[in-house]
Amino acid sequence: MSQDYHDPSDPSGPSQDHVDIPLVAPRITMLGRLRAYFFAGILVTAPAAITFYVAWLIIGFIDKQVTSLLPGRYNPNEILPFSIPGLGLIILIIFLVMVGAFAAGFLGRMAVRTSENLLARMPVIRSVYGAVKQIFETVLATKSTAFRQVVLVEYPRRGIWAMGFVSGITEGEVQNLTEDELINVFLPTTPNPTSGFLLFVPRRDLVVLNMSVEEGIKMVVSGGIVTPVDPRPAEEKKVPLLASTESNPPPPVPEERQPW
């Protein structure tokens, strides 16, 4: 039995009405639903559980080190039938407050000055002590500008951007050797932000980001998985501040996007 062929473009052929094909939502099986619930449970509980576990390890380590220095008859963990969590941390905080109060007084200043003069005469220890003290004074200073800004810098070559943290204005011999105004930029590594590189970058080549230092550290640790939200208006998001460097030289960074 033969079947006649009709050209679809031939108006004399049989009419073909448009047929709507309904879209059927994919059917989720019970196993798929349980798997989705399982991953949702991990997403909810894992961050809090890991945070509490790390905090518990740190507090336990401090408790063990501090309470071991207490005599047995003055150690509540040995007198009481149960141990007190966080006792060592509380004792450490009280001790640091007392040391700070003593150092702020006249006798305390004399004792600190004498100990610093003693350490300054030791060949190796004086270098370590001086560097560590300067770092702590810079980071803990109330009005310090160290690690207060997150910036973008073209590294390791032009066209590739890396995120760094401003640690200060370059001074001394490094600054005196160049005409550009240099900025100290700490370039952290992923996922360990405590290690990295120190770069001396001209101010005009840095792009200041709106994200906070905490948000920048989260982005570095997560390898870019955790991305902060851009707080700028929608109109500003549509206009890129930096043009592509494929064919044209990079434009100067806007003044408001330069550090300080």
Image (spheres, grey):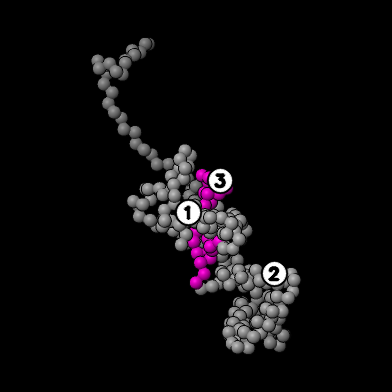
Reply above or below: 175 against 78: above
Q: Nearer the viewer, mark 1 or mark 3?
A: 1
Check disc 2 and give the amino acid type: Ser
- Image coordinates for residue 54, horizontal then vertical, percent: 60, 66
- Secondary structure beneath dot 1 equals helix
Mark 2 / mark 3, whichever is N-terminal: 2
Q: Which mark is residue 127?
A: 2
The answer to whether residue 218 shows anywhere in this view is no
Query: What residue type is disc 3 on?
Result: Arg
Q: Which residue is mark 1?
A: 204
Determine the CA span between mark 1 and mark 3: 16 Å
Q: Which is nearer the N-term, disc 1 or disc 3?
A: 3
The numbered mark at residue 157 is 3
Residue 169 on the magenta span: yes
The one of 127 and 59 positioned closer to us in this rendering: 127
At x 29%, y 28%, the residue is: 18
Q: Is 153 or 60 nearer to us in this picture?
A: 153
Above or below residue 134? Residue 190 is above
Distance of label 2 from label 3 (alpha carbons): 34 Å
Disc 2 and disc 3 in contact, CB within 8 angstroms: no
3D distance between C-alphas at marks 1 and 2: 34 Å
> What crowding class fits label 3: few (fewer than 14 Cα within 10 Å), some (14-19), or many (20 or more)?
few
The answer to whether 77 appears left or right of 182 in the picture is right
Q: Give the residues drawn in magenta, as a range.
A: 143-170
Q: Is residue 24 above or below residue 144?
A: above
| Residue 86 as seen in the image, left or right of residue 30 | right
Q: Amino acid at mark 1?
A: Arg
